[in-house]
């Protein structure tokens, strides 16, 4: 039997097993029951389902904005938090900024609240997910920063996670690769569309000249 209980406000998953011994006459003599906490197993299963679903959604996303919103919303669900944000890298300025495709209301983790620009930049350069502890009053106690290749970073409020261990950091690494791959694919598709449009315009120009 697998069942769940709520203990101190947290959901726990338990698995119970029972066994019965019989006497010489074949009648029940004693019963033994064992209950095992399988919360971690259930949480891993949930994380893997969420990660697989996120990957499928990223593959279906077409525009940069759709990819980023999918990344942000599903990262929040994956890590069990209410707050996640995306910062894009601007080659022109060399800065990480909230993505312009996200509205002001979407930007839940602002630069002013986090106040950890240099720390986040370091994660972006290193290319590995990392827990950052902002040194600013009123900021979250910790944020998980997930680099997105050359595109920017995903920032998750780690206050609500109850701690992010090595398993979730590994999960963040897989998520990072999936999001970066989707953004790379989007850029290639946009470049191909632009080239196709340019070739179409040239073909029209040549056709016009031939008709003269």
Image: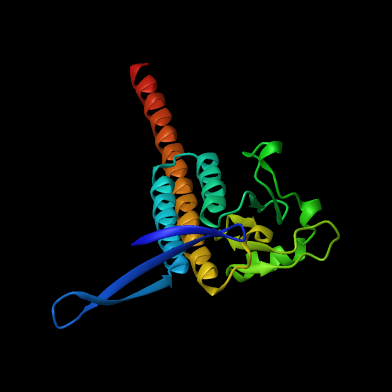
Q: Residue 154 at what x, y percent from top left?
A: 61, 56
Looking at the image, which is closer to me, 187 or 45?
A: 45
Q: Residue 124 at what x, y percent from top left?
A: 64, 64
Q: Residue 201 occupies which quadrant of the picture?
A: top left
The residue at the far top in this view is: 212
Question: Where is 175 relative to 185, above or below?
Answer: below
- Where is the N terminus found, in terms of image quarters? bottom left
Question: Where is 151 relative to 34, above or below?
Answer: above
Compared across the picture, whether 189 is left or right of 125 comes to left
The residue at the far front in this view is: 25
What's the residue at 51%, 45% (across, down)? 70
Question: Where is 81 relative to 193, above or below?
Answer: below
Q: Residue 121 at what x, y percent from top left?
A: 70, 64
Looking at the image, which is closer to me, 209 or 108?
A: 108
Q: Residue 47 occupies which quadrant of the picture?
A: bottom left
- Where is the C terminus found, in terms of image quarters? top left
What's the residue at 50%, 70% (across, down)? 170
Q: Residue 131 occupies which quadrant of the picture?
A: bottom right
What's the residue at 40%, 59% (across, down)? 3
Looking at the image, which is closer to me, 129 or 157?
A: 157
Compared across the picture, whether 45 is left or right of 145 comes to left
Compared across the picture, whether 14 is left or right of 93 comes to left
Q: Residue 41 at what x, y percent from top left?
A: 42, 67
């Amino acid at each position: 039997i697998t069942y769940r209980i709520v203990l101190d406000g947290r959901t726990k998953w338990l698995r119970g097993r029972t066994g019965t011994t019989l006497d010489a006459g074949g009648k029940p003599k004693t019963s033994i029951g064992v209950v095992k906490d399988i919360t971690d197993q259930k949480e891993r299963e949930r994380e893997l389902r969420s990660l697989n679903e996120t990957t499928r959604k990223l593959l279906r996303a077409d525009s940069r904005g759709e990819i980023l919103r999918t990344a942000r919303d599903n990262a929040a669900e994956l890590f069990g938090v209410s707050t996640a944000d995306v910062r894009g890298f601007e080659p022109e300025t060399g800065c990480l900024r909230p993505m312009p495709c996200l509205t002001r209301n979407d930007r839940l983790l602002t630069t002013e609240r986090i106040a950890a620009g240099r720390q986040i930049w370091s994660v972006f350069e290193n290319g590995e997910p990392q827990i950052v502890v902002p040194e600013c009053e009123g900021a979250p106690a910790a944020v998980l920063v997930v680099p997105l290749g050359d595109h920017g970073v995903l920032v998750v409020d780690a206050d609500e996670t109850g701690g992010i261990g090595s398993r979730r950091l590994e999960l963040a690494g897989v998520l990072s690769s999936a999001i970066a791959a989707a953004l790379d694919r989007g850029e290639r598709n946009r470049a191909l569309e632009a080239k196709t449009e340019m070739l179409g315009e040239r073909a029209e120009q040549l056709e016009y000249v031939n008709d003269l």
